[in-house]
Image (spheres, rainbow, N blue to C red):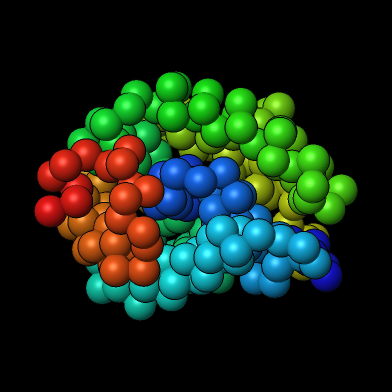
Amino acid sequence: MCFESRGTNMNWLAHLFLSEQNIDHQLGNLLCDPCKGRAFEGASDAFTRGLKIHKSIDAFTDAHARFLKSKSRLTKKGHLKGVVIDLTYDVFLTQCWREYCDRDLNSFLDDFYHKAPMALTSYPPQARAFVEKLIQVDHLRQYHNLDDLAETFKRVDKRLSANVLKRESTLDYLPLIEQNFAMLKNDFKTFFPPLLKHVQTLSDNSKLGHWQPLTKS
């Protein structure tokens, strides 16, 4: 059953960009963590493939040397560094968007926001509520700079348990992100092309038409 617990990965913009241009595939990629990686009864094949690509992206990312290097730059010990880097990488994706996508970010997101509500009519209520809230609050458009990142960290911290917050919060890492911003951005730009190539091997490349031609090479 979907939505047994909330996932911790929140780099939704990257997962949306790395999806095939099929709304069910995009939704599967976005809803993988909340659904604990399992499709709901009656889900389309595209939705299931979206779940699978999300899992593969996460596994590739967690094992990649540059992602690990980014985590190591946050010298503070803690369990939230992966979440913090995920969200920071979405800032870099936003800042470098036209290097990877042949459509401007607003147009890309407007298209998703238009198609998602129509597709969601056949989804379970919790799935609809999750995506509708994501669209309503417009999280995907809010990764432009450190100020936006700080606001995102505040939202994440509100969802953390009291026990976790006794040890650390995502906002605790903001000074380290700021100090290492240029190096972290270089990490992202080194990491992202290999991730794109990895996703290509698992996708229908004819449905990756939103990627820049250089990205597809």
Q: Is residue 173 left or right of residue 124?
A: left
Q: 194 above or below 26?
A: below
Give the side of residue 176 with respect to residue 195, left or right. Answer: right
- Location of residue 33 (image quadrant): bottom right
Residue 9, relative to residue 201: is it above or below?
above
Could you tell me residue 110's position as x and y percent?
A: 53, 24
Residue ID at (65%, 48%): 156
- Residue drawn where x is 45% and y is 51% of the image: 19
Residue 212, given in percent of the width and then of the height, sits at: 21, 39
- Along the line of sight, the residue nearer the viewer: 120 or 186: 120
Q: Nearer the viewer, residue 92 or 117?
A: 117
- Across and down, in percent, residue 124 comes to 84, 53
Quadrant showing the N terminus:
bottom right
Looking at the image, which is closer to me, 35 or 137? Answer: 35
Which residue ends up furthest to the right in the rendered image? 125
Nearer to the camera, 20 or 185: 20
Whether residue 98 sits left or right of residue 93 in the image: it is left
**In this picture, is 65 found above or below 33?**
below
Q: How many marks?
A: 0
Q: Residue at x 29, y 69 (%)?
A: 201
Q: Is residue 196 visible?
A: yes
> Which residue is depicted at the point 61% across and 26% down?
114
Q: Is residue 72 left or right of 4 when viewed as pictured? A: left
Residue 188 percent across, percent down from the top left: 27, 53
Q: For residue 151, say whether it is visible.
A: no
